Each structure stands twice: as C-alpha cells, then as structure tokens.
Amino acid sequence: MTNRRQFLKKMVALSSLSLSSCGWRLANVGDNYTGSGQSDELHIYTWTQYTDQELLSTFTAQTGMKVLADVYDSNDVMLAKLQAGGGGTYSIIYPSDYMVQKMVDKNLLTPINHERLIGLDNLFPRFQNPSYDPYNRYSIPFNWGTTGLLYNSEKLPTAPEDWEYLWQNKDKLHKKITLLNDVREVIGAALRMLGYSYNSQNETEIKQAYEKLKELKPAIAAFDTDAWQNQMLAGDLLLAMCYSADAVKISKENPKLKFVIPRSGSSLWTDTIVIPKTSPNVAGAYAWINLILRPEVAAQISQRLNISTPNHAGFEQLPKQLQNNTNLFPSEALLKNCERLTPVGKFEEVYERYWTQLLA
C-alpha cells in the first residue's frame, strides 16, 4: 500500500520566458487576465508526462502568469491529496475518465462554461460527448490511449498476444516483469483474461482475479507505474504492463521494445483537464484550456510528449507516420475488446481489500 500511495515530489516553477524557442506563434489565450495577487500564478496538478518546459513557458509568454506544476503517479494519490485538503492551490487537475465521475459525485469540480472556451469543436466527435462526462460538462480531454504490454523483442522473440502469456511464461519472466501500481488496471486485466468485465461488480469474479494474480506474484519484480522505464531500457526487465503513451516514448529510445494490446481486451482510457471548485485562478484555468485546444499546440504536444491527441484538427497537422502509429492511434479493430474503467460504487472496497492482500 505504501508504494501505491507514494507521491512523486517534483515541482516545476517557470517564470516568464521567451517564446522564440517554442516554435509556436499564438493569438492571445488569456481570459481578461489582470496580473494581481493569486492571478500571477497558475498551479496545476498533473501526470508526470503531461507537461514540459516548452508548454509551460509558452503559457507564461502568452499570459504573464508563472506556472507551477506538481505531478502524481496515480488517480488515487491525487484524490487523496484533494480530500485531505491539500489541493487548494490548484486551478487545473488532470484526472482520468472514471475519476472525473467520482470527483463530480464528491462535488469537487466546477462545471465548465463552454462560452469561455475557444476550439472545443476541434475535438474528434467521440470526445465531444463522452460517456464518462456527457457533453464535457466538467472536463476537457487531453490524452487517450490503452493499457498493454511492452516487451523486449530481442530477448522474447515470440510476442505476447494476451494477458495469459504472463502466467504461461512466469518461470522465464521470473522477477523480470512489472505490473502497474494501480488496483483497477491490474485486477481489471486479470478479470478480462478470465472473460469478465474490467468493471466487474461480482465479488466471486474479483476473488478469482485476485487468486490468479497471487499465483503470478512471485514472478513480479514490482508493482510500478514509472520506474520500470529505465529498467526496461537497461535490459533489467523483459516485460512491463504499461500505458500506451509511456510505451511509445520508451520504444522511440529502443525500437526493440514493442507494445501490444492484449487480444482478450484491455482498458481504454482518457486523461482530462478539470477545474476544481477550490481553484484560486479560474481565469488562468480557462486560459490554460484554451491553449491546449489550439490545433497547432495539440499537434506539437502530441509530437513532443508522445501522446494521442483527442483534437481532430491537431491530429490533421501531425506527420502521416505519426497518424499511422497504431500504438498512439489504434484501429477500431484493436479497440473493439477494450473497456473504459467506470466507478464501481460499493465494490470499490472489495477491489481495495483484495489489492491490499495482494501487495501484503
């Protein structure tokens, strides 16, 4: 449980920087900004991969606001911090799709005023009315992808086709594999392998998934969301369960590392941008969202951060090679067996109980 709750203490603080190094020429993205008091700064809370210096410095150059970014490695870490009262400084947060629903239910989010947005119609149609947040009332999609397996094709010449590969090859993979540090993803993968839904609300099914994972546990080097990347590059791991965005980034550094979406299905996720009710800089938050919605910015972010943009106008500006990268933009055939994670109500306690037992 300790690993799972570990908070990545990284902070990026950028003051006003020149736009000349960014390669972007933008119109004003501000929202009647007046530089005074708290409005001089925009605090965001995001995943480790979702900001870089060019993005933050561009926003600073456009608005005059200094940007400070804290990062987290799981939705649970983020939610726990907010509920403990530690999120009052943030004006922008990046929860995943199912977490948006939970945060709405907990009355943590401000409804988004679409009249203050420019470019919402740039999104692919599937992201303009998503099931997890109809008509984007509380969230704007930022990145989407799948969960799968990244493997060393040099040392594992036979590609894993499904989750069951881990169990069938657990001796060969002993202490050379990692699974995500995420209760719903890990138990969900085992559920899917057994023919059940990622979002099962049947304790018998969840227990079966737990028993399968317990069987595999001696072969697992760690439950980890980020640190596995350097280990894969160093050759210390043969296979890692990971998000497609991370897989694309790592495989660019070593093309022998290949990503597969398991045949029986996996999770289909969207990470979003929301404005918390405690936001101290709402104008800055809308300025940030408007920057992200610009097609040229979306395209640049997709290329630099190796993420799958939900912005159709931005997608059209990507090189064909990137548009045709099925790790970033899987075909409908690859996605047909994938499911979105959804809130499971009272069964969240059941997942947590078996997860705690698994990590013990």
Image (tube, grey):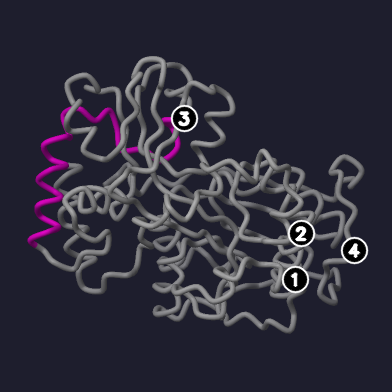
Residue at (22, 19) in percent of width and height: 172
Identified by mark 3, the residue type is: Gln
Above/below status of 258 relative to 18: above
Q: Residues under labels 2 and 4: Cα distance?
A: 12 Å
Which mark is first along the chain, 4 or 3? 4
Foreground residue among 115 and 65? 115
Residue at (32, 23) in percent of width and height: 158
Label 3 Cα neighbours within 10 Å, binned few <14 / some 14-19 / many ≥20: some
Location of residue 348 in the rendering, given as x and y in whole percent from the top left corner: 24, 66
Residue denoted by label 1 = 119
Q: Taken as a whole, is the magenta stretch helix, strand or loop?
A: helix
Residue denoted by label 3 = 229
Residue at (30, 28) in percent of width and height: 177
Q: In what quadrant of the picture does the C terminus appear? A: top left
Label 2 Cα neighbours within 10 Å, binned few <14 / some 14-19 / many ≥20: many
Which mark is first along the chain, 4 or 2? 4
Q: Residues under labels 3 and 4: Cα distance?
A: 37 Å
The segment highlighted magenta reads 204-228
Label 1 Cα neighbours within 10 Å, binned few <14 / some 14-19 / many ≥20: some
Q: Please state which of the two labelled residues, at mark 3 or mark 1, is closer to the viewer.
A: 1
Identified by mark 2, the residue type is: Pro
Identified by mark 4, the residue type is: Ala
Asked whether residue 270 is in view, the answer is: yes
Disc number placed over residue 27 in the picture, else none: 4
Residue denoted by label 2 = 295
Lateral position of residue 62 relative to residue 276, left or right: right
Is the C-beta separation of discs 1 and 2 under 8 Å? yes
Location of residue 305 in the rendering, given as x and y in whole percent from the top left corner: 64, 42
Which mark is first along the chain, 3 or 2? 3
Label 4 Cα neighbours within 10 Å, binned few <14 / some 14-19 / many ≥20: few
Q: Describe the element under mark 4 as helix, strand or loop.
A: loop
Which mark is first along the chain, 4 or 1? 4
